[in-house]
Amino acid sequence: MLSSFSSAREIQVSQLHFKQVLLPGGWSREVRLSIADGRIAAVHVGVAAGEADERHAIGVPGLPNLHSHGFQRGMAGLTEIRGASSDNFWTWRDLMYRFVARMTPEDVEAITAQAYVEMLEAGFTRAGEFHYIHHDPSGAPYGDIAELGGRVAAAAQASGIGLTLLPVFYAHAGFGGQAPDQGQRRFVNSVDRFARLLEASRAAVAGCTGAVVGIAPHSLRAVTPDELTAILALADTGPIHIHIAEQTKEVEDCIAWSDSRPVQWLLDHAPVDRRWCLVHATHMTGEETRAMAETGAVAGLCPMTEANLGDGIFNAPEFGDAGGGFGVGTDSNVLIGAADELRQLEYSQRLRLRARNVISTTGIASTGRALFDGALAGGAQALGVAGGLAAGLAADIVSLDADSPALAGRSADAILDGWIFASRRSPVDCVWTSGRRVVTNGRHHQAESVAAGFRRRLEGLLEA
Ligand SMILES: [Zn+2]
């Protein structure tokens, strides 16, 4: 086990003072955030820094990372090799399955911890872990059926990142209930066993401050309609995430199976609402785009992974015009960065539309601000928490280094534009989660020990 922070019940009181900080109503100057028991107890605007204040120049809310497969950080950069035939998502998935086949619980914990440390250093303060490896390499459940969910929780606890654990239900290799293949044996459950796994997962996160447990039917490929109905009944009030319409082959297979496209099928057959996060939703018609926006479900966009895997480009302008909300996720964790995801999201739209400043919010000129606000609101909704810096909410805070060249002379929204579009090095300075500082000068407090554990595990895995 990695060493972990002391009990969440330990009460801490502190005061942070920012020259400028992004509050729910916009940028404010000379602001004190009082923190007690992991939450923001009070926000005072227009007050000079006092002796009891820890002083910082620029503060923004921590961003939620709504879609992660932590263990995939271990194979980042290992699949950038061209095979005998042309490479695509499905050849990448074959490699991922071979990696999965070898991983021990210790591997999962150490690799996920590295991913979470990197997320925190990048300005993410909560991870939505779409967790689908459940069983041992033979496909048999561990003695504790939620052993690997517990390892994810241990990684979250050790790093200090907030956790929304999304245990994945996976049962089939393709549409129409096809039998799972060998590469999927560590993922597969019956509905009954999934119910037990979910209960055990709720117990497994008990040590993580502010943890949320939702559910994740993996995709329409992996879940039959009857199974979908059965597992939705187990969701309680937590979030519901599903991979959908990531690949054109998936769309074609769905049409062949049901005469309907994936998003259309889901909206016709499931009670999709604000609790849902539709991850990717890359390939939608205009009609699907508008219908999805109307449900209030969040579009879980993973622009770097979608680019890396050659998935396609989300229809952002039409979705935004219809009132749809989005968040961002690091998904395959090929490169972990909050600013990087937001920049890629905007740049993919610019390339597609041959236009500039595409992602926008009414009344706000800054693209960086529109991206940041969108990802904060949509990410928090998708992870079952409230986001932003306000009294009563978790003290998940990021400070930025005002001396960073990309932020020179900037204030307010221009800070976000400088961070997202113009920083060669991340200006993230300090990061607090639930009121506890876990990153200082851009480095996680346990970065070295976590990286050492990660290296040891990778050396073993890649030798095997
Ligand atoms: Zn994913």
Image (tube, helix red, strand yellow):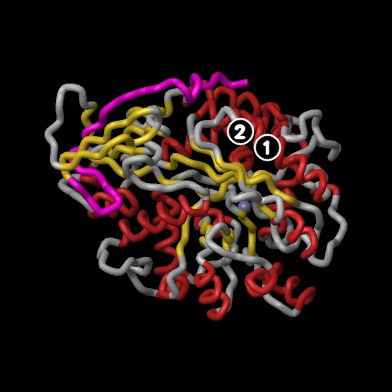
Start-end of magenta stretch: 1-28
Identify which amino acid the numbered label 2 is placed on: Val
Check whether the beta carbons of the residues at disc 2 and disc 1 lie within 8 A of each other: yes
**Disc 2 residue lies near ligand 1 with CB under 8 A:** no
**Residue in the picture at 32% in, 24% down:** 13
The residue singled out by tag 1 in the image is 201
Q: Nearer the viewer, residue 243 or 13?
A: 13
Percent across and percent down for residue 267 are 63, 71
- Tag 1: residue type? Ser
Task: Give me the C-alpha separation between circle 2 and circle 1.
Answer: 7 Å
| Residue 115 in view here | yes
Residue 163, image quadrant? top right
Label 1 CA crowd tier, 10 Å (few <14, some 14–19, many 20+): many
Q: Is 139 placed above or below 36 here?
A: below
Q: Is residue 345 magenta?
A: no
Q: Nearer the viewer, residue 167 or 195?
A: 195
